[in-house]
Amino acid sequence: MKRSTLELLCCPGCQAALSLRDERGNGTVDEGGLFCPHCERSFLIRNGIVHFICPQELGGLNRRFGRFYDRLSHVYALFTKMAFLPMGGERKARKEILDRLDLNCGRILEVSIGPGVNLPYLFESPTVGEVYGLDISAAQLARCRSFVTKRGWSVDLFLGMAEALPFKAGSFDSVFHIGGINFFSGKKEAIDEMIRVARPGSKIVIADETERVARLYDRIPGFSRSYHGKKADTAVPVHLVPDTMEETRVDDIWKAHGQYHGYCLEFRKPA
């Protein structure tokens, strides 16, 4: 983590500013901790990744899918590459979403960054700015850190929940999420948080599979959207976007065999 990133961070619980403790690293903070003087919570920094959650403290679908993505981390990149083949390939499928972002050399936050599968297409753009990524899976983030280190990219990574982002209000010029919101424990809370951390005038882009594809996932062991007898609502969450947002639109994406397999929801935070 860059030391300058501390200016963007806040406690995910009370949103108070944080202070560094026992930091170690050469130019960056590789080990150490963060402390919230307001609620007196501490957060570890390991291998440059700030841990704002403990996996065992997760509940609901977040707990299940955090563990699921930990187990899937070693094959996730290959799995998604193969899944996008019928849709024209991974590049086409990912750029169908990423090309909607307003980069303009500003700060970019990817919520659910996984092992970093979107990063090669982001860094192709001459207008890409500082990139930050958050995920609920520690194993996915470890792979992402290894990936960006090999590529020489500067990407700060955080273990945390989309429903409680550890960033100050108005920190990012672009916020996006691809895949996963269908199975978040709190979709509305996650959308509200993406809006909170975006600067006024920023675009927010959210994409995931359609309800039809989500039903297919129910057949995969460990991937069921059922929890305590209830199934997660995997409808396009446009109804959770506040009426105050501007330029709200939903497009069908990822077409294969005459059918669309995903949706892209985008809107702009009022300036």
Image: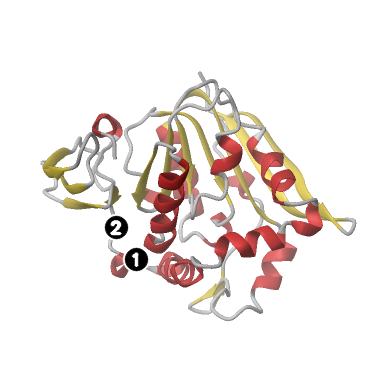
Marks 1/2: CA distance? 8 Å
User: Could you say which quadrant of the image residue 127 lies in?
Assistant: top right
256 sits to left or right of 242: right
Q: Are marks 1 and 2 in contact (CB under 8 Å)?
A: yes
- Is residue 36 visible in the rendered image? The answer is no
Image position, residue 192 (x, y; %): 46, 41
> What amino acid type is highlighted by mark number 2?
Ile
Mark 2 crowdedness (10 Å alpha carbons): few <14, some 14-19, many ≥20: some
Q: Which residue is mark 2?
A: 53
**In-front residue for pair 33/36:** 33
Image position, residue 14 (x, y; %): 23, 43
34 sits to left or right of 69: left
- Is residue 1 visible in the rendered image? The answer is yes
Which element type, helix, strand or loop, lies under badge 1? loop
> What amino acid type is highlighted by mark number 1?
Leu
Mark 1 crowdedness (10 Å alpha carbons): few <14, some 14-19, many ≥20: some
**Residue drawn at x 20%, y 51% as measured from the top left:** 43
Which element type, helix, strand or loop, lies under badge 2? loop
**In-front residue for pair 229/104:** 104
User: Could you say which quadrant of the image residue 34 lies in?
Assistant: top left
